Amino acid sequence: MDFFPLLLLLLPCRIQVGSSMKLSPETLTVLRGEEARFTCSASGIQWNVMVWLLNGTVTLTISKKIGILPSTNPNVKAEESPTSKGDSWVFVLKSTEWYNQGPVTCDLQDIDRKTANLFVQEKGSVKVSGADKLAFKGQSILFECQATAWFPEPTLQWQVNDKKVSQGEYNISSEQSEKSLFTVTSNLSVTAAKSSRVDCLVSVSALPAPLKSSVRLTVVAEVVQEEDDCTVALVATASVSALLLLLLLCICTVLCYRQRRQAKPGPQEAIRFDQSVSGRGLVAEVTGGEVNLGYSSEGPTDAVYRQMDFVSFHKVPDVACTSSLPLHCEKQTQMCVAEENPKIVRTITTV
């Protein structure tokens, strides 16, 4: 009779032999706004009610006979595993927020309970200040990277041409805002040796890959060396262009000089014109008349001056001829003298 109470105590233990309860994952880290999923399985356990608690508060209840009971939280749901025969359920938090961070518990009523941990992180932004940079070889260039609105404090890493920069070559400072968000700032000094791509990478554990911001550093000396052939061609083209320009300038100078010489009258033409004018003036003094500038002797040059004279003078006075017969002259010459009064006639005859 003394062994009967002991058998009653050992009976439940014998029934649970080979049974187990499991909650996975034990720790889950997600970004704010992403979905969180936990699986609770009860293999070989005769359970009736499964209760899910978030931060100690009942969020969802599942009955093995009825299924999912109505919940007041629209942000949660449960999914039955297709191969579990009702012994495995997935608790889904549709969109995580910071206040969801904490313990997640699966409680098999009057049997057992398991607890996991949920962590919620915030993905911010990253930006390298300024645009692409141009530098001479050997010049020191400063780059600044700022990561804003992250939680928890993110890790920051610099890369130059996909190679990590040692942490001793740059500095990092961080500050936390009232909303518990972190802002991280870092400065990196690079000596311009060759053209490179500079990357700033920021990440938290929930990110599958770091966020990256990049700028381009172009070294002027390297561009000239790499494009040596192009530089030689450019110099040759410039030299040929300068020679052609000089030749064109010489041709223009010669043409202008020849044109000016053709436009200037020659010495013989000037003498002929002076003689013509002086001769006409002498005749006018002897006869007491006026010089008729419209008259010309001969030659194409005189014809030009005659045409100009006729344009300049509107009227030529009437001309009358007079003659007289002195006895001591052997040759007779008749001269016409212009008079203002056409009725007065003067005749000069020389024999």
Image (spheres, helix red, strand yellow):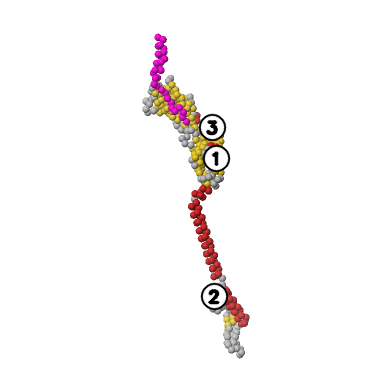
The amino acid type of the residue labelled 2 equals Thr
Q: Residues within 10 Å of mark 2 (few under 14, many from 20)?
A: few
Question: Is 109 displayed left or right of 179 in the figure?
Answer: left
Whole-number angstrom distance, CA of label 2 to CA of label 3? 106 Å
Is residue 84 shown in magenta? no
Name the residue: 62% across, 82% down.
Answer: 286
The answer to whether residue 16 is above or below residue 255 is above
Q: Is mark 2 on a helix, strand or loop?
A: helix
Among numbered discs 2 and 3, the one appearing first in the sequence? 3
- In the image, 34 versus 83, the foreground residue is 83
- In the image, 39 versus 237, the foreground residue is 237
Q: Can you tell which quarter of the image residue 290 is in?
A: bottom right
Q: Do the residues labelled 2 and 3 touch (CB within 8 Å)?
A: no
Which contiguous range is marked in magenta? 1-29
The answer to whether residue 6 is above or below residue 212 is above
Q: Which residue is under mark 3?
A: 180
The amino acid type of the residue labelled 3 equals Ser
Q: Are marks 3 and 1 in contact (CB under 8 Å)?
A: no
Q: Residues within 10 Å of mark 1 (few under 14, many from 20)?
A: some
Among numbered discs 3 and 1, the one appearing first in the sequence? 3
Q: Is mark 3 on a helix, strand or loop?
A: loop
Q: Which residue is under mark 2?
A: 301
The amino acid type of the residue labelled 1 equals Leu
Question: Is 18 displayed left or right of 300 in the figure?
Answer: left
Numbered label attached to residue 75? none
Q: Which residue is under mark 1?
A: 188
Is residue 12 shown in magenta? yes
Q: Quadrant of the N terminus?
A: top left
Asked whether the viewer can see residue 330, the reply is yes
